Image: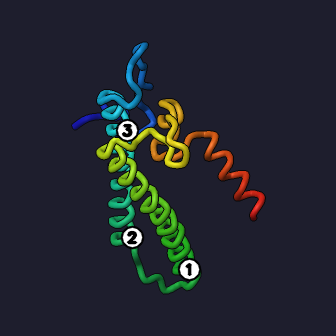
Amino acid sequence: MATAQEDPNKTNPYAFKPYQPVEGEEYMNPAQLEHFRKILRGWKSQLMEEVDRTLHHMQNDAANFPDPTDRATQESEFSLELRTRDRERKLIKKIDEALERIETADYGFCETCGVEIGLRRLEARPTATQCIDCKTLDELREKQMG
C-alpha cells in the first residue's frame, strides 16, 4: 500500500512537482499533457474517495434519534455534507471535461480567444478554460451586471 509520502497525489492532488519546460519546447506537447492528465486524475480520484466516504458515513451513522435536537443536528450535518458533495460532483464534471479537452487537443487554450492559458495558471486551476485576461473581463462584466 502506498503511503502519502510515496504518492503525494493520494492525499493532495496539488502536491505535485511543477512542470519545468525546456527552452524551445512546444506548448501542450505530450509530456505537458501527461503532466496535467495525472493532476486531473489524481484530483478526481481524491474526490471520488470523498464521495465513497460520505456514502459509508451516512449509511453507518444514520440513526433515528428519539431526541428531536439530536435528530436535527444529524440532519443538519448530513445536509451540509450533501451540499459539499454536490459541489464536488460539479467539480468532477469539470475535471472530466478537462480530461476530454486533453484527448481532443483543446486543453490549455482559451475557449474565448484561443491563446495559451499558461502552464502555471493550469497548475493552479487545472480545469481553467480561459486565459487570465478573458477571465478577468468576464468577472468585470459579471460584477457590473450583478
Image height of 103 relative to 97, above or below: above
Q: Which residue is mark 1?
A: 72
- The answer to whether residue 30 shows anywhere in this view is yes
**Callout 2: SS:** helix
**Which mark's residue is nearer the viewer, 2 or 3?**
3
The disc, 2 or 1, on the residue closer to the chain's N-terminal end is 2
Residue kind at label 1, given as amino acid type: Ala
Amino acid bearing label 2: Met
- The disc at residue 58 is 2
How far is mark 2 from mark 3, CA to CA? 29 Å
Q: Position of residue 31 (x, y in %)?
A: 31, 27
Label whose residue precedes the other's in the sequence (1 or 3):
3
Q: Nearer the viewer, residue 125 or 48?
A: 125
For the C terminus, the image quarter is bottom right
Q: Camera-side residue: 8 or 59? A: 8
Classify mark 2: residues with Cα within 10 Å, few (<14), some (14-19) or many (20+). Answer: some
**Residue at horizontal 34 percent and vertical 41 percent from the top:** 105
Q: Is residue 12 visible to us here?
A: no
Q: Which residue is identified by label 3?
A: 39
User: Mark 3: few, some, or many residues within 10 Å (few <14, many ≥20)?
Assistant: many
In the structure shown, which secondary structural element does the residue marked by tag 1 occupy? helix
Horizontal arrangement in the rendering, residue 86 relative to residue 41 (left or right): right
The answer to which image quadrant residue 88 occupies is bottom left
Task: Measuring from the top left, give residue 73's x and y in whole percent.
Answer: 56, 74
Residue visible at 33% across and 50% down in the picture: 100
Q: Nearer the viewer, residue 130 or 68?
A: 130
Please identify the quarter of the rendering in which residue 108 is found.
top left
Report crowding for label 1: few under 14, some 14 to 19, many 20 or more residues within 10 A (C-alpha).
Answer: few
Residue occupying image coordinates x 31% and y 33%: 34
